[in-house]
Amino acid sequence: MVWKARRADQRVVLAGRTDGLGERLNALLNAIRLANLLGVDFRFSWPRRPAGEAQQAIEPAEDFFSAEFIAAHLIEHDTIGTRYRLPSGRAPDLEALRDQLMAAEGGLLAPNRWLGRFLDHRAVSGVSGGFSTEFARIGFHPRIEAVRRAAGEVPLLGEAAGLHLRAGDILHGDLETWNRSTAKIVPAPVARALTERLRAEGRDVLIFGQDQDLIDELCRSTGALDASSMRPPGVVTQAEVAMFDLALLSRCDPIISGNSGFARQAAIIADQHPSDFRELVTAQEIVSVTRTDIAAHGQNYSATQRAFAWWSAYYTARNDTDPAEAITLVEHALGSDPSNPHYRLRLAALYHRDGQHERGDDVLMAALAADAGEGGPALRSVLLFSASQAGLARMTPGTRLWDSAEILGDIESAAGRGPGPAVIYRAALRSARGEAAGAAADLTTFRRHLSSTPSLAAIGQLDELAAATITARSPSGEGRA
């Protein structure tokens, strides 16, 4: 697809996201609004998701949008390059933002977040508010449009509340190690508590999400309604399901969720604001609810959901809880899901922070043993720890960025205590920073630790994997350590 002809000096606002449907459509809505404010046209790209990413409802543009909308606004994603820029800073007025537009070869990239971050909403009317008008300007494929109409015809009794749980690629995909994703999901115990509260007020509660077993359990035990049961028989593709759910969720009030782009979009196209579950339940209440609910209903949740509930309770309350409770919560998370390496790393860090160094070392040794057992080309937990701190321009294939800043000092401090397992984590971090000599010294120290630790010495491939991990963290990709 090629965009319609335009003058060489004509800039546009472009929605060019590559992630999930909610964030793509959020950026598109922002592009339409910014283009209207700036008096220019808008464009969008719609790249296909990589094969195997089944959790994302991304269909080809020609199957999702109308032919007329595509002809007027679609461009090929690989033509974007560096010709478009995100707005920088917070423009005080439209003229300042227009200067940024004209300074870029192609124009501005539309963000997927609140426009008030980039343009002073107090000085420029029309920055804030709902997006029902912009949403109406999107031309959808007739099949998608029919699905949206069907959602509008579902009978609802009074003001039904919508609860969007989320799950998908965070709990069951490769985002499980990204701590910031924690805020996107409503954990099962909190979902139950909020549902029971709303039901006690006499409200119907429609539950949306991607974990059908959990939804079934909550509906069976609380009287909530499964939103998926309201879909017509012909709604079958992921895109159809997503658009039906989006339209149905937009009819709910309130819309309760985590920091989910999908839920946020459902709210803004209905000109309302979503309610973040953390605004409705305090951090300490989440800890209390989690303990009580898992004791009563934990056997009805999957191990992954139980683990996430414990993790979410810890992560939400981590700045307002004592060390012993923090450790206990993460111990429960790891006990429910021993395969998740970032639970291990956080627990090891908390032990070291609390002065329980032997227990911290034991957890790190268990993490290394688990890494070796996976049979990968490098030590997974070590790659995770060093990933975001290095400022790397590239990531090791298959490794997701995660925010390890909070435990950086704990692991580095543990490495400074002597030749324990934390040394290999510091070695990878040093290598990623370009500190080849320090990384080499740490690798030598770690090898001494291997030879003196029977439980690790028995894992013959650890030495080889450690060296490969240091190489992977090197900025040049070469084995300088």
Image: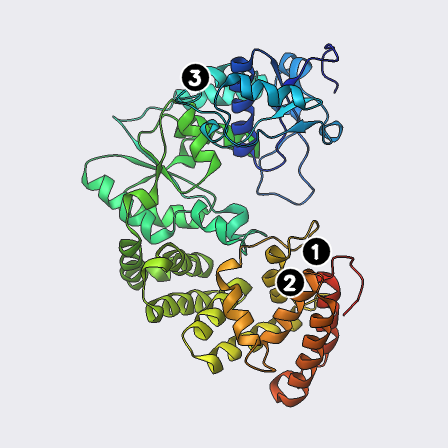
- Mark 2 in CB contact with mark 1 (< 8 angstroms): yes
Per the image, label 2 sits on a secondary structure element best described as helix
Residue at (42% x, 78% y) in the render = 355
| Position in image of residue 348 (x %, y %) | 49, 72
Per the image, label 3 sits on a secondary structure element best described as loop
Q: Which residue is mark 1?
A: 396
Residue at (66% x, 66% y) in the render = 430
Visible in this render: residue 385?
A: yes
- Mark 3 in CB contact with mark 2 (< 8 angstroms): no
The quadrant the N terminus occupies is: top right
Q: Earlier in the sequence, mark 1 or mark 3?
A: 3
Amino acid under disc 1: Thr
Near mark 1 (Cα within 10 A), the count class, few <14, some 14-19 or many ≥20, is some
Residue 126 disc label:
3
Visible in this render: residue 13?
A: no
Q: Earlier in the sequence, mark 2 or mark 1?
A: 2
Q: Which residue is mark 2?
A: 383
378, above or below 64, in the image: below
